[in-house]
Image: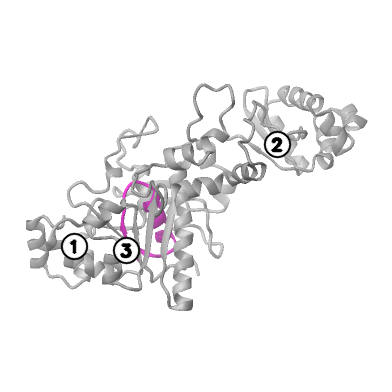
Amino acid sequence: MRKPMTGVRVLEVAQFTFVPSAGAVLADWGADVIKVENPVTGDAQRGLVTVAGRSATAPGVSFSPTVEAPNRGKRSVGLSLALNQSRPVFEELVRRSDVFLTNHLPQARAKLRIDLDEIRRINPSIIYVAGSGFGSEGPDRDNGAYDSTAFWARAGNADGVTAAESEVPVGMPAGAFGDNIGGITIAGAVAAALYGRQATGETSVVDVSLLAVGAWANQSNVNLAMLYGCPLPKIDHRTQALGNPLTGAYRCSDGRFIQLSMLQPTRYWAPLCRLLGLRKAADDERFETSESLAANADEATALLADAIGARTFDDCTRLLDLLGGQWAPVQDAWEVANDESMLANGRIATVEDAQGNRQRLVANPVKFDDAFAELSRAPLFAEHTDEVLRELGMEDHDLIDLKIEGAIT
């Protein structure tokens, strides 16, 4: 079953990345996702010219990953939710859908008549999904958010990676970092809700907030803070785990880094030392047991740092490949795009853009039945309005009338 969501209809009234990325994953998995966009402006994400200080498109190329990634595989309908003339069309789309996705705030949902009660009045069995900044309850339920605020800052992730002496908190490593984690969380919740509806006949309301997703990602620290009953001590400069020199980042002679994460240090200490030419250290009783290695961790770390620092990145990775312990190169985004394991598992997928050019996108991390991801491009703004409305039984003269009234694009 390469596309387990085949036959599922999803209606999306959302913009930017958080909830739309959930729709993209569901489309990857086979769902028919119909994206309703403002008939004049479309999804606000389409208007982004720069992302994280970089141009949203490459020179001479119209393909924008910022739009493509969270909207691939969908069909776009330009439909006004503010006009009464378009209401019958919208309601028919709701009736024919299994899932309704939105990230509009409660007041906007009420104004547009897309809140839970209204959608359930039209289709009592639909699964209603609302993505928000801070959840459906509490004092901030009506407040908007982006992942940089709710997921990163408020959920403790920024604080967790910021050193005590830093003058500013560390920013997210990439645009939509929390949005994409939240999106696949929603996709998993939708799958569970669909299964539950099939098994019990009862439908669900799904509520996923960026704050809750951020706290889940940061739960190791949050759980420890609750155990201790106080804030955790700030991290220091070292990336090593306390007492274990076989963890953390080490700099190679050419400026590249490798990340060690060998949580059984006595198992790997001697073999690693021999690979690095540290034969005396391999047999040194100071590093023989976990207790003695932890007690002399600073000396052991310095030995490794000198040995690794005297070798190039390529030399270090060649030696570490012989070890079998847990480590990884510290890679940039371009290296990830060409990572052998990503490619071998089909997690970098090819998509044909609107101009017929072959482009590449990161596939969602779930693989079914060893099948490589098969992606189709994101829709152009309102590209499928006529197609979808004809499926509802509308004739050409009906479409023309709605266009004249400004109800559809």
Label ID, residue 278: none
Magenta stretch: residue 15 in it? yes
In this orientation, does residue 383 appear?
no
Cα separation, mark 1 vs mark 2, equals: 55 Å
The answer to which of marks 1 and 2 sits earlier in the sequence is: 2
The Cα atoms of the two marked residues, 3 and 1, are separated by 27 Å
Where residue 245 appears, x then y in whole percent? Answer: 76, 32
Query: Where is residue 326 shown, x and y percent of the image?
Result: 71, 43
Q: Is residue 307 above or below residue 154?
A: above
Q: Amino acid at mark 3?
A: Leu
Bin the neighbour count of mark 3 within 10 Å (Cα to Cα): few under 14, some 14-19, many 20 and up: some
Residue where numbered disc 1 is placed: 386
Is residue 50 visible in the rendered image? The answer is yes
As helix, strand or loop, the secondary structure at mark 1 comes to: helix
Residue interval drawn in magenta:
10-32
Name which residue type carries label 1: Asp
Does residue 76 belong to the magenta stretch?
A: no
The tally of labels here is 3
The percent position of residue 285, horizontal first and vertical second, equals: 93, 31
Horizontally, is 321 left or right of 359 in the view? right
Residue denoted by label 3: 116
Q: Nearer the viewer, mark 3 or mark 1?
A: 3
What is the C-alpha distance between the residues marked 2 and 3? 49 Å
**300 lies above or below 261:** above
Quadrant in which the C terminus is drawn: bottom left
Q: Earlier in the sequence, mark 3 or mark 1?
A: 3
